[in-house]
Image (spheres, grey):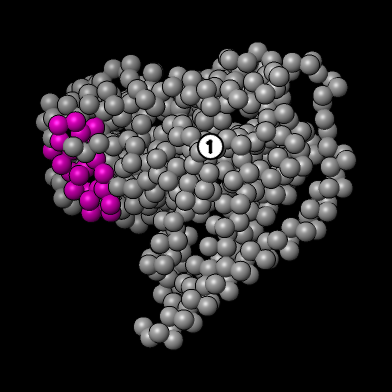
Amino acid sequence: MSVLQKLVYWLIEVALFVATCWLFLLCLYPLMLIIFVKKLFIKNHDIERKDDEVTVGIFHPYCNAGAGGERVLWAAVKALQSNYKNVHVYIYTGDLDHDREMILANVEKVFDMKLQHNINIVYLRRRKWVEAKMYPFCTLFAQSFGSIWLGLEALILFKPDIYIDTMGYAFTYPIFKYIGGCKVASYTHYPIISTDMLNHVSQRSVSFNNRHIIARNPILTRMKLGYYKGIASLYGLAGRTADIVMVNSSWTKEHINSIWKCPQRTYLLYPPCDVEKLTQLQLLSDAEKNNEILIVSVSQFRPEKNHALMIEVMSKIKPLIAEEVWKKVHLVLVGSCRNEDDESYVKGLKSTAKKLDVNDNVEFKVNIPYAALISEIQKGTIGIHAMWNEHFGISVVDGLAAGLIMVANASGGPKADIIDTKDKIRNGFLAKDADEYTKIIISIINMTAEERDAIRNAARKSVNRFSTKCFENELVKIMEPFFKLKQR
């Protein structure tokens, strides 16, 4: 590449960076005018409540989704209820079709968690503005701006003393802090943009968030880099307004610190995993499993979870093992569907399994109750998780605790915090691509029962630090300054 070409590409990148920032700010001006006018009408419940009452508003537009992020939400609610008797919790959600009783019943069904009833649901009607399907282009930019609009609706409906975002909508923080006068805390599962994403685009790699047409064109690549850097800059400005920042893994902490630049108030808080119950499950022998080899995946049905790779792995395993063994091997995909997009995604996966001629060995368990999920895990031999740069991996920990031999992607949280591949203390495996997954799974199938049990036992010993109790204790410790200020 010539010096002139490098200069042109650099100028394109800088121009897109500046344009993205200015466009965002220009769009913000009319919105700020609306905000200041509507501030007069923000509901303040101070007159209606006792002097020592503390209201906590938790922003989680998909509170009824039933995935790992929702487990964090409800475990946080439980921790606050258990430690502060004067707390009243308000959940901001866009789940308009579910009343409070239905939502709490679903929490008990999916997570086996009973909550006190001092919980109020604040319904948001603008949730569609943060959904990717609304924006075929400039999705990150538009969703970020849409989250401001949604956050404004939430603040107008109810202004809490303490605002906690548990879904990563950083652009709502300035609204609640500077307009609502709230103390702001965040729990970030996954940064909306990271240095890994920037590197992925820079290296012109094709992925679900970097189309082939962009990856193969150097000019479009530079334009996207400038756009991403603009978003990252704005994201950092918004994130830094949080008073307390909690992150779910070492991987997330590294990326948040690099973008938000507030390490002194950033805390690593592993998400709550159901290890207390799962480690008590009986480890079934091969005979008790009818000598079936179930490869179990537990994750929400979304493209980034990469279920397609798991099905591809099954197609690669098929010709490499004896036919009588193949008949015993089944991939069981367990997960929740939030909406029509997720349901369409599942239909596409079923078509893929049929196309690859492994549909008889692939099972789908969609939106099943917690008890049924536990049963599937207990019957399994191998656990599989294929998401690249998974922020943490609650289901990976659950699999280790339940006695599955986990095979996860060699990136993100599973690599940084969960899976240890040293031979003497190995608790699972890491793989980079379909071929590595295939090789590892076949090796597990060929292991003796004693070899498998050694890994399963090591896995169970490694998960205590991820317990729900640890999460609750650490959360209360981190949040304590907010409640002390209120008491004063």
Magenta segment boundaries in residue numbering: 423-446
Could one spot residue 335 in this view of the protein? no
Closer to the camera in the image, 390 or 386: 390
- Look at 28% across and 37% down and name the residue there: 419
Indicate the quadrant containing the C terminus: top left, top right, bottom left or bottom right. top right
Q: Is residue 416 above or below residue 118?
A: below
Instruction: Determine the main secondary structure of the stretch shown in magenta.
Output: helix
Residue visible at 40% across and 84% down? 3
Q: Position of residue 406 (x, y in %)?
A: 28, 36
Q: Could you say where residue 134 lies in the image, as x and y percent from the top left?
A: 64, 57
Q: Quadrant of residue 173?
A: top right
Instruction: Tell me if mark 1 has few (under 14), some (14-19) or many (20+) residues whose alpha carbon lies within 10 angstroms of its own.
Output: some
Does residue 445 appear left or right of residue 249 in this picture? Answer: left
Image spot of residue 352 (x, y percent)? 38, 54
Snapshot quadrant of residue 48: top right
Quick one: 26 or 288, which is closer to the camera? 26
The residue type indicated by label 1 comes to Arg
Residue 434 within the magenta-colored segment of the rendering: yes
Q: Is residue 405 above or below residue 226?
A: above
Element under label 1?
A: helix
The residue beneath circle 1 is 265
From this view, report whether residue 472 is shown above or below residue 325.
above
Q: Is residue 209 magenta?
A: no
Name the spot of residue 81 as percent of width and height, x first: 61, 17
Q: Is residue 478 above or below residue 240?
A: above
Q: Measuring 52% from the left and 30% from the top, which residue is drawn there?
A: 72
Total marks in image: 1
Q: Residue at x 78, y 16 (%)?
A: 51
Quadrant of the frame with the N terminus: bottom left
Residue 422 can be seen, yes or no: yes
